[in-house]
Image (cartoon, helix red, strand yellow):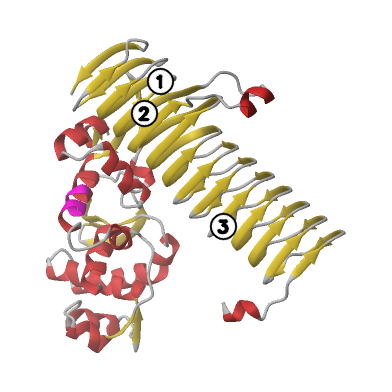
């Protein structure tokens, strides 16, 4: 685990940001509280961060800062769902999802006239995974099932989407972010993605 | 607002007990007990209030005694009397001239302390201005921290942009006369900020860019990236440019 952590000092060195900026971003909820990991070291208590996530996040903040205010940025990073409703037509027009995903949604029997953000998110994830070739159409239906049944349980909490296959049999999971899990040898983890990154991308597209 | 104007006012002048609910103006002049959540436009306590539930009000002024067993959410809070909040305090503007004890965390924009505040959780705000006595058992994260020491104050850790802790030039009669709190000093384990000015502060580690360590300080380790100035009446274990 320690390989994936970065100390606060290293982080400031690497990114060139100041203590003031780091704490301001924390106050604005741009950096979630749970990323500040307290550990004792030889100099006493030290703060560590999950390396990949914090570097990616700071890079995003620095790059988007000019266009958006800190409050707007906080909105982008927050895992909570806003109030958005869109029809299938709108989603197609704004290039958020493709017809294939909407068709799959119909196949899964979950077609709707208006999609709330939660469902748009589901379509967006589905679309991205289909387009990247990570999942098949049948697996897409499974994804729709697991997300519509269980995604609400993670409201406001960070979560991850996991797809495993064993001997070609796929299975989707939604888990709390950062969980460790282990499988027997026959299992391959095909996809493991934090839902937060999908949500950030989607919110930028919508906003 | 318009909808709120249709609500009733709640006035307590003698002794009374109520279940809570939604009100426009709440004014407590006697003794009151509220057994539930209260949602109102303005809240004024001049007597004694004991609440079991959450209080949410656009403005809250407490002159008497107040005990809240639940969180307080408001856009303006002013405490001139004694208040104990057994929960979190959320308010952009907080002013304490009396005594305020918070068992949860405090989130604000501007916090002005002229009296005494004791917080068990973390404090997060844009500017903290203290002319009294603070004790924060958690972490203080503020854009600017300005503390003028009257008595002994403390925080577990401080992080922010500008941190300025100095002794009050002329110790005025009040804090001396009540003889509480001891000599002016500030105790913390860690201070991290961009601009740091300290006096009479005892800390384990101070990290930042431009640091001034003034008289009466006792600091084990200073790490700086810009400039460091140490007063001859200060004790610094070791300093390191990073």
Q: Which residues are magenta?
A: A58-62
Is residue A194 visible in the rendered image? The answer is yes
Q: Calculate the distance from the C-alpha at mark 2 to the C-alpha at mark 1.
A: 7 Å
Which dot marks residue B15?
A: none
Within 10 Å of the Cα at label 1, are there few (<14), some (14-19), or many (20+) other Cα atoms? many
* In the foreground, B39 or A207: B39
* In the foreground, A87 or B170: B170
Q: Is residue A30 above or below residue A133?
A: above
Circle 2 residue: B191
Element type where label 2 sits in the image: strand
Is residue A46 visible in the rendered image? The answer is no
Q: Are marks 2 and 1 in contact (CB under 8 Å)?
A: yes
Circle 3 residue: B73
The quadrant of the rendering that contains the N terminus of chain B is bottom right
Q: Earlier in the sequence, mark 2 or mark 1?
A: 2
- Check the residue under mark 1 and report the chain it is in: B
Query: Magenta part mainly helix, strand or loop?
Result: helix
Which residue: 25% across, 35% down? A5
Q: Is residue A11 left or right of residue B46?
A: left
- Residue B11 lies, in percent from the top left, at 78, 66
Which residue: 34% across, 46% down? A26
Q: Is residue A194 left or right of residue B186?
A: left
Q: Establish whether labels 2 and 3 are both on one chain.
A: yes
Circle 1 residue: B203
Q: Calculate the distance from the C-alpha at mark 2 to the C-alpha at mark 3.
A: 29 Å
């Amino acid at each position: 685990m320690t390989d994936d952590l970065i100390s606060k000092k290293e982080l400031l060195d690497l990114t060139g940001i100041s203590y003031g900026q780091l704490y301001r971003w924390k106050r604005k909820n741009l950096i979630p509280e749970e990323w500040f990991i307290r550990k004792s070291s030889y100099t006493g208590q030290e703060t560590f961060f999950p390396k990949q996530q914090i570097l990616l996040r700071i890079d995003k903040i620095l790059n988007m800062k000019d266009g958006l205010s800190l409050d707007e940025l906080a909105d982008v990073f927050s895992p909570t769902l806003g109030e958005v409703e869109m029809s299938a037509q709108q989603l197609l027009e704004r290039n958020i999802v493709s017809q294939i995903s909407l068709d799959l949604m119909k196949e899964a029997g979950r077609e709707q006239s208006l999609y709330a953000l939660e469902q748009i998110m589901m379509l967006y994830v589905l679309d991205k995974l289909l387009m990247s070739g990570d999942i098949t159409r049948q697996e897409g239906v499974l994804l729709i099932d697991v997300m519509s049944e269980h995604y609400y349980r993670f409201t406001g909490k960070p979560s991850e989407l996991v797809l495993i296959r064993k001997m070609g049999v796929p299975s989707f999971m939604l888990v709390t972010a950062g969980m460790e899990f282990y499988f027997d040898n026959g299992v391959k983890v095909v996809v493991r993605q934090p839902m937060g990154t999908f949500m950030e991308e989607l919110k930028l597209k919508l906003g | 607002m318009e909808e709120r104007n249709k609500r009733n006012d709640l006035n307590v002048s003698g002794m009374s007990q109520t279940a809570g609910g939604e009100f426009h103006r709440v004014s407590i002049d006697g003794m009151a007990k509220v057994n539930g959540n209260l949602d109102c436009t303005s809240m004024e306590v001049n007597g004694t209030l004991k609440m079991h539930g959450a209080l949410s009000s656009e403005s809250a002024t407490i002159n008497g005694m107040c005990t809240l067993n639940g969180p307080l959410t408001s856009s303006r809070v002013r405490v001139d009397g004694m208040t104990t909040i057994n929960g979190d305090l959320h308010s952009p503007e907080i002013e304490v001239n009396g005594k305020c004890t918070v068992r949860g965390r405090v989130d604000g924009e501007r916090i002005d302390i002229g009296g005494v505040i004791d917080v068990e959780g973390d404090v997060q705000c844009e500017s903290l201005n203290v002319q009294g006595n603070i004790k924060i058992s958690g972490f203080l994260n503020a854009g600017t921290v300005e503390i003028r020491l009257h008595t002994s104050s403390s925080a577990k850790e401080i992080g922010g942009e500008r941190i300025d802790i100095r002794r009050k030039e002329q110790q005025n009669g009040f804090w001396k006369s009540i003889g509480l709190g001891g000599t002016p000093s500030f105790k913390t384990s860690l201070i991290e900020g961009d601009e740091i000015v300290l006096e009479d502060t005892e800390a384990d580690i101070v990290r930042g860019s431009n640091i001034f360590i003034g008289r009466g300080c006792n600091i084990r380790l200073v790490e700086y990236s810009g400039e460091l100035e140490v007063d001859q009446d200060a004790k610094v274990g070791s300093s390191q440019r990073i």
